[in-house]
Image: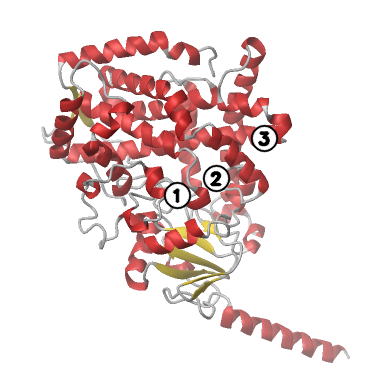
Amino acid sequence: MALHVFQASAVLAAGLILYVLLFVGRRGRNMPDGPPTLPIIGNLHQLPKQKVYLQFTEWAKKYGGMYTLKLGPATAVVLSDRRIVKQLLDKRSAISSERPTNEVSQHIITEGDHLLWMNNTPAWRLMRKLIHQDLTEKMCENDHHKIQQAESVQMLHDMLKSPDDWLRHLKRFSNSVITSIVYGIRSPSIDSTYIIRLNALLEKWARINEFGATPPVDIFPFLKLIPERFLGNWVTRATVVHDEMHALYNKLRETVEKRREAMGPMPTVVDRLLDQQEKTGLTTHQITLLSGVTIKGGSDTSASVLSSFMQAMVTNPHIVKKAQAEIDAVVGDDRVPNWSDYESLPYVAAIVKESHRWRPVAPLSVPHALSEDEWVDGKLIPKGTTIFLNVWGLHHDESKFPNHDVFDPDHYKGRTLLASEYANSADYENRDHYGYGNGRRLCPGIHLADRNLFHAISKILWAFNIEKATDPKTGKPIEPDTSMVTGYREGLTACAYEFPVKLTVRSPAKRKTILKEHDDAKANVFPDYEKTAIF
């Protein structure tokens, strides 16, 4: 009897091993093509540890705008084709808005309450609806324009005073706009403890969320049993981000609660969330993370796009001159540009779009996942498949942009509609860029971000000559490193490493205007957001 049991067990074990060798890591029937696989691991051995979107784009040239990868037993599809992106992520967003399982981001760091990583659940839909209500186009036009104008004027003032800190000034500007809207609290200085802590947190968050930054425990759960010291201390690194994130976001929420007790509510995002908490049923943790993810998105992404803009201007002086000529014809010296100038400055609007395209802030976006089987062009994409939106590949499609690695605002000549209008249009071929995502995952801050970028870019071009800095040792111009491989940080979001820039105000009249408008902002706008200090 024991012998029979042993023999049966051996046959079952052999069958299981044979099944794994034959099927695990291999594509199923009717699925899109892709690079050759190996048993069990599929294509995992072919993936670089960093900036995988560059490899994805090379594969797209060979296997097309939709191809599959086998990540062990899991399946991924990479999209680099505009038509298929529109079909699958927009038109079929009801089934393509899930997130793939992510132990690090969904569980260890955010405890399941982070809007970016949550699945398409009733809680996610409620939280997205609530945050969207405060960031609509109407709200941006009627409520948020004053703080955007005032903070972008302070950005110019700060660049006048310490031009070498230009990148920190850009980060302060984008952060102060969104914290004012979300918490009613400004970020008045690049040296504030809060700004320093937030920027450090954002960098750690971006690094740990990059594809390949942690072991594939979601694909091979047994890896969780291996001591983390053999796998890059991934749990410890994630826990550090969790602790720093919650400490900072809790402090911000508690500051609002103390201000409400002392002075009453303000028209901010967090105030409205707290006022509606009994009705919505949101937990304190959900409110904390929802407001935190909003400032994260509003801070890091805009500043990253602006850093790419500065690289492009330093290396393309002819574009600077052309943009300044357009601005000078409309604005003059006695005021700074504002949002009402948008339609009169089409070349500047094109620079905003090209800054998104040339060096996308999220080259691989955040992956989607399918909640059910789907057929596209006669090919099966199974339920549970991870969908990578290859933003880098779309933005550097040689058939669409023959000079794709050249910063050229004329790519958008005659295309001055705002990004939200192109994203929601059925004309997928005419979409400007994919910097704000797709479908139900389209960035809820798209209206605010577009305006932030126009405020900053138009004002910097109006105010300053932007030139290469000079090496004090050699006397030669310092060339910025514009390569995505060596000139940009690793992580979920791409931001240029800091580089020196020579900023000089274009005229005494412009200097006078900056100082005057900054005084006006200090007197008439900033006091509403300086009732409470964070630290």
Crowdedness near tag 1: few (<14), some (14–19) or many (≥20) residues, C-alpha within 10 Å: many
Residue placed furthest toward the left: 475
State which mark lies toward you, 3 or 1: 1
Query: Which residue occupies 33% across, 58% down?
Result: 429
Crowdedness near tag 3: few (<14), some (14–19) or many (≥20) residues, C-alpha within 10 Å: some
The foreground one among 227 and 163 is 163
> Where residue 89 sits in the image (x, y, percent)?
48, 58
Residue tagged by mark 2?
116
Label 2 or label 3, whichever comes before in sequence order: 2
User: CA–CA distance between discs 2 and 1?
Assistant: 11 Å
Residue tagged by mark 3?
285
- Label 3, secondary structure: give it: helix
Residues at discs 3 and 1 in contact (Cβ within 8 Å): no
Kindly indicate the quadrant of the structure image that contains residue 510.
Answer: top left
Placement of the C terminus among the 4 image quadrants: top right
Residue tagged by mark 1?
437
Query: Which residue occupies 24% across, 55% down?
Result: 404
In the depicted structure, whether residue 335 falls above or below residue 112? above
* Residue 68 left/right relative to 348: right
